[in-house]
Image: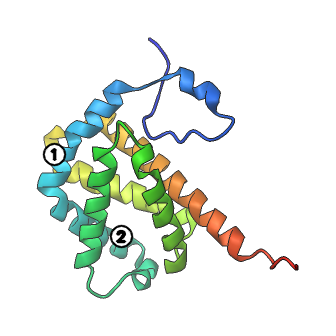
């Protein structure tokens, strides 16, 4: 069995050696196929997600607007866009970096991302029912972790840049 890499694995300078490993096409297929689930049950997934998030972590509720409907649509649109571009993740990397930088301004911290990913996978699994599998859960967990990594790194870079002292001329 050949070694493959996840399609969302970000390749940075110095990671050229990773390019010799092919993208895991089976993962791409599973994620792409699950896109129909997201499209058909997406509003239910996002409603369940935010309800569960606020129930388990009420302290994060203040980071969101009172009317969560627009946020639910944004989350759904982002999930769809990410999976639509699973074969070409570089097309959404810039958007995810921008999203990560904006989330810092909303109060998001790196430790929030794992919570978000876990609850989101749980809600996807619940909505998928019998169409969910351990393999699909792994693929989604990996995809969301890698998306989170992109967002976290962009947020940390933005935070570090905002704390640099101005240079004198």
Q: Is residue 169 above or below residue 27?
A: below
Residue 36, label in figure: 1
Residue drawn at x 50%, y 18% is 3
- On residue 17, the disc is none
- Judged left or right of residue 146, residue 157 is right
Q: Residue 131 at x, y = what percent?
A: 16, 39
How would you rate the neighbour count of disc 1 (Cα within 10 Å): few for under 14, some for 14-19, many for 20 or more?
Answer: few
> In terms of sequence position, does the residue under pointer 1 or pointer 2 come before the other?
1
Where disc 1 sits, the SS reads helix
> Percent position (x, y) of residue 75?
30, 64
Residue 122 at least partly seen = no
Foreground residue, 114 or 19? 19
Depicted 142 relative to depicted 52: above or below: above
- Of residue 48 and residue 56, the one placed in the foreground of this image is 48
21 shown above or below 15: above
- On the image, which quarter does residue 35 sit in? top left
Query: Which residue is the extreme one toward the front?
Result: 169
Mark 2 highlights which residue?
Answer: 53
Residue at the limit of the structure toward the bottom, as seen here: 66
Give me the residue at 26% from left, 61% from top: 77
Image quadrant for the N terminus? top left
Percent x, y of residue 67: 26, 85
């Amino acid at each position: 069995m050949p070694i493959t890499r996840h399609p969302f694995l970000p390749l940075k300078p110095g990671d050229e050696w990773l390019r010799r490993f092919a993208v895991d096409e089976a993962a791409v297929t599973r994620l792409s196929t699950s896109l129909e689930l997201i499209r058909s049950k997406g509003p239910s997934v996002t409603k369940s997600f935010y309800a569960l998030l606020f129930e388990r972590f009420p302290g994060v509720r203040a980071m969101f607007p009172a009317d969560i409907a627009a946020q639910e649509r944004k989350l759904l649109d982002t999930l769809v866009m990410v999976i639509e571009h699973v074969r070409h993740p570089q097309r959404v990397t810039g958007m995810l970096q921008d999203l990560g930088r904006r989330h810092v301004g909303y109060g998001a911290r790196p430790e929030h991302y794992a919570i978000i990913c876990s609850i989101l996978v749980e809600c996807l699994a619940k909505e998928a029912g019998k169409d969910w599998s351990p393999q699909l859960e792994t693929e989604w967990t990996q995809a969301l972790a890698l998306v989170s990594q992109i967002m976290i790194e962009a947020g940390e870079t933005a935070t570090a840049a905002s704390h640099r002292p101005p240079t004198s001329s």
